[in-house]
Image: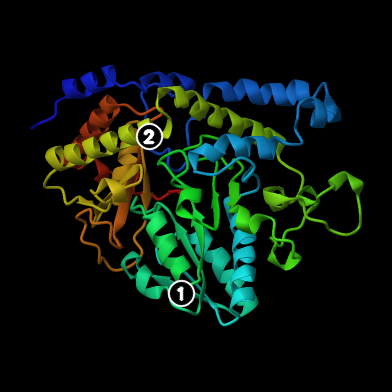
Amino acid sequence: MTITHQDCRALDAQDPLAPLRAHFTLPPGVIYLDGNSLGVLPKATAARVADVVAREWGTDLIKSWNTASWFDLPQRLGNQLAPLIGAGKDEVVCTDSTSINLYKVLSAALNIAREDSPTRKRIVSERSNFPTDLYIAEGLCKERGLELVLVEPEDIAAALTSDVAVLMLTHVNYRTGAMHDMAAITAAAHAQGILCVWDLAHSAGAVPVDLNGAGADFSIGCGYKYLNGGPGAPAFVWVHPRHASRPDLKFMQPLSGWWGHAAPFAFTPDYQPAPGITRYLCGTQPIISLSALQCGLDVFTAAQSLGGMAALRTKSLALTDLFIKLVEERCAGHGLGLATPRDHARRGSQVCLTKDTGAYAIVQALIARGVIGDYRAGSGAASGSGKGNGGTVHKDILRFGFTPLYIGFEDVWNAVEHLRQVLDTAEWQRPEFNQQHAVT
């Protein structure tokens, strides 16, 4: 059955989540399909940051560590975030960057795993994992004389051998939008005595996650994608309670700064770790950035009355289903492939299209029209089927993220219409769209 523009408008009219769009500042004439890279500005953020700067800092000065509760902001935001990722109270802190937090948890995981079995000398990860994760793991392996083993997603199970210490995966793949079965993979790893570290950068706020239900060991993620915390927003870190308060210092994260101390204002010369997740803090916290992140998390708190993550997931799947269907109906014959799984259980909140040539220029032409997605370069010879099976895809990617907090069904229709026009007219071949920028 063919879907019309009017059908999409009707879907928006009956969307119970439509009121959430009013929480965001969306530029007129822009269809923003890049919230999987940088989230939209919540309307409350500018006033909140201005208040932190002008009043809490400018007027109240150092008193605000107490009067404005700056001091416990990482824990308060962690508790606000926790329900989105299946974590319990006082199990999450918002702090530092994704890369720094990964260094902390991967170091701790290696210490724990190798204490139990010194012969475990490997970290296993997906070859197409986000590069910063691989770089951090590579650095730790060089430092400790270990081996980083990279495999295709279909080969993960076979790679879980007795010499593996840690399995490190991103829940939703940044290139393809393919989503792992966290519970099943964690169980398979644990059956071989392997600890699991999960990166939720493309999951938190986009898909339901249940870290405790899956029995995961460690997790990290960023605050500036679906959580809408702003560019470079603080990240977050979760550690399962069975690991968080281990008494031996060798099982701790290595960045033992003063904010992770049990009594930071006692100013003792020796390090005594704070209980639980607080020990995963390091230095003085970025209060202005954390305050901006709080505005993004507040929207998810508001969404709870509308069905929360379950409702957001239902809409996300409907949006991505619609996009796939319309692209295949209206853009046929232009050599587009589908890298994202069709199976709902294996799909994140993005759709990634492949094209042999011109992917970057097509995205630039769309951006010039106000349809903002992004481009990811291929990683070698094409071996993916391009049929949406979630396997390895090495072709160039046109990547579109669908944030159900502020994207509607008519947005999807209009985005595909612009894509059709760009392809039909060969608009993307214009020279200005083929000049590559530093950030793609």
> With respect to residue 223, does 153 lie above or below?
below
Q: Foreground residue, 127 or 342?
A: 342
User: How many marks can you see?
Assistant: 2
Q: Which of the image's four quarters has the N terminus?
A: top left
Q: What element carries label 1?
A: strand
> With respect to residue 312, does 198 lie above or below?
below
Could you say which quadrant of the image residue 433 lies in?
top left
Q: Foreground residue, 111 or 52?
A: 111
Q: In this view, does 248 lie to the left or right of 199?
A: right
Q: Is residue 75 left or right of residue 406?
A: right
Alpha carbon of mark 1 to alpha carbon of mark 2: how far? 35 Å
Which residue is at 34% across, 43% downward? 350
Number of other residues with Cα within 10 Å of mark 1, as a class: few under 14, some 14 to 19, many 20 or more:
some
Which amino acid type is shown beneath numbered disc 2?
Ala
Question: Can you see residue 32?
Answer: no
Position of residue 84 measured from the top left corner of the image (x, y, whole percent):
49, 38
Which residue does the numbered mark 1 point to in the structure image? 149
Which residue is at 23% across, 53% downward? 388
On residue 310, the disc is 2
Number of other residues with Cα within 10 Å of mark 2, as a class: few under 14, some 14 to 19, many 20 or more:
few
> With respect to residue 296, does 281 lie above or below?
below
Mark 1 or 2 closer to N-term?
Answer: 1
